[in-house]
Amino acid sequence: MIRLVQVRALPGYKLWVRFDDATEGEVDLSHLVGKGVFAAWNDYRVFEQVRIESGAISWADQIDICPDTVYMSITGKTPEELFPSLRGEIAYA
């Protein structure tokens, strides 16, 4: 299992992240600003308070993002590539 080890807020609602397999990169989250719980990011200072909490990318106690999604965004890997157990044969009844 790949683990998130560092996260940092960048201008323009982007994050820089690093994982324990040495994968690192940026992800743009600007499309989320102002939507639902992400309305809190209308104050950019809230976005800057990003941290790792229980393995997730988190802000306060209200917002978190799955690091697996960010990893797939950076690497272009599919869920089946990241989690081989998802590969399975389709059975038709």
Image (cartoon, rainbow, N blue to C red):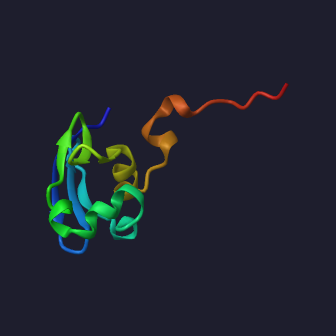
Q: Which sits in the foreground, 70 or 33?
A: 33
Q: Position of residue 54 (x, y in %)?
A: 23, 33
Q: Which sits in the foreground, 38 or 16?
A: 38
Name the residue at the bottom extreme.
12
Residue under the image location 85 percent in, 25 percent down: 93
Name the residue at the top extreme.
93
Q: Which sits in the foreground, 45 or 80?
A: 45
Q: Position of residue 74 (x, y in %)?
A: 34, 58
Q: In the picture, residue 38 is in which quadrant?
A: bottom left
As drawn, 58 above or below 84: below
Q: In the picture, residue 25 is in which quadrant?
A: bottom left
Residue 26 horizontal side relative to residue 35, left or right: left
As drawn, 80 above or below 26: above
Q: Which sits in the foreground, 47 or 36?
A: 36
> Quadrant location of the N terminus?
top left
Residue under the image location 34 percent in, 52 percent down: 70
Q: Position of residue 91 (x, y in %)?
A: 76, 27
